[in-house]
Image (cartoon, helix red, strand yellow):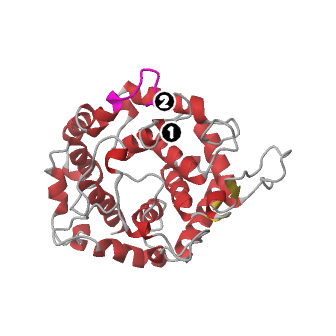
Amino acid sequence: MSWKSQLNGDSVTWLLESETAGVRYLALRDLVPSASTRSELAAAREAAHTKGPIADILQHMRREGYWVKPGSGYGPKYTSTVWSLILLAQLGAQKGEDPRLDRACQYYLDHAFNPLGQMSFSGAPGSTADCLQGNMLWALVTLGCDDPRLATAYEWMARTVTGEGLASATDRHAPLRYYSAKCGPLFACGANNKLPCAWGGAKVMMAFSVWPKKKRTPLIKRAIEQGADFFLNADPATANYPNGWSSKPSGNWWKFGFPVFYVTDILQIAEAMVSLGYGDDPRLAKTLDLIRSKQDSDGRWPLEYNYASKTWGTFGAPKKANPWVTLRALRVLKAVH
């Protein structure tokens, strides 16, 4: 039985017939690779990079490799280097298609990477957090960056999950320690009252999911296992994760969106877990049912969370069937079939 039996309608054809070059390219690449010739896929990839949102974002890049403001790239939200690279990765951009992408990746690493492995807001090791570390490692790897500094950053990130070899934040003389924001193991974050932050943790797991298996050290493998247990033991469909400042989960968990920055939805947990090989884990079953239930009668998913005019471009009308969100959902459902 085809994986499409999970769908209420033929949303795949809808994506393949999209007037947005990037949507068609990602649908060809991720949903029907066996049905597309190499030349067709190559043409779609080229079109996605020369017209549409990828091309528009790259037009705003400065010659040196940054967006809006030089430096580590976190601000201003959501148009500076950090957010531009995350968005480009979600749009399917590849550095092999445009030399500006390689320049941007190198610029970011030169200004935000700390030799101990942290991706930081300022370049200093203390100004790091799981959401930033995970988002940027996922984005850089997805864009095709293969800089050797990434391995160091992944080892640091894995260590922060397991706690191995890290001193407490109060031990300021330790060469490797936690900090006020990245304050403890298993996604603990100062912004979440020092409790594990599932929003940040989802970014970490997304980053692990794109790191090649041959590069996953024993430490990274342990971090993946511990992170998966954190997310699956709570049942992602309930989003019942630690809340430092509230008695109940944020309603944004149930709002599937595009692009996805540091606000996280349940669909992204599924994306990470499925990519890491947990698609058939029974603890994910209710989450997959939830994803299926949110499609409309045509097998399409609506845009429930977006950044509108806050970032580069717009990606659909709120609460309407959306190709980018539909792509996200279909990738998951195809992979778990």
Dot 2 falls on a residue whose secondary structure is loop
Range shown magenta: 58-69
Near mark 1 (Cα within 10 A), the count class, few <14, some 14-19 or many ≥20, is some
Provide residue 273's location: percent of width, then percent of height. 47, 64
Q: Is residue 4 above or below residue 155?
A: below
Task: Quadrant for residue 100, please give it.
Answer: top left
> Is residue 170 shown left or right of residue 129?
right
Residue that carries the numbered disc 1 in the rendered image: 75
Between residues 248 and 225, which one lies in front from this camera angle? 248
Q: Residue 140 magenta-drawn?
A: no
Whether residues under marks 2 and 1 lie with C-beta atoms below 8 angstroms apart, the answer is yes
59 in magenta: yes
Residue found 68% across the figure and 37% down from its top: 124
Q: In the rendered image, is residue 148 in sight? A: no
Q: Residue at x 59, y 71 (%)?
A: 242
- Location of the C terminus by quadrant is bottom left
Residue 29 shows which numbered tag? none
Instruction: Tell me residue 186's x, y (percent).
Output: 65, 63
Residue type (three-letter) at the residue carrying disc 1: Gly
The outermost residue toward the top is 63
Q: Residue at x 20, y 68 (%)?
A: 299
N-terminal of the pair, mark 2 or mark 1, is 2
The rendered magenta stretch, by its main secondary structure, is classed as: loop
Front-lying residue, 51 or 337:
51
Residue 42 position, x and y percent, is 24, 36
**Mark 2 = which residue?**
69
Q: Nearer the viewer, residue 236 or 27?
A: 236
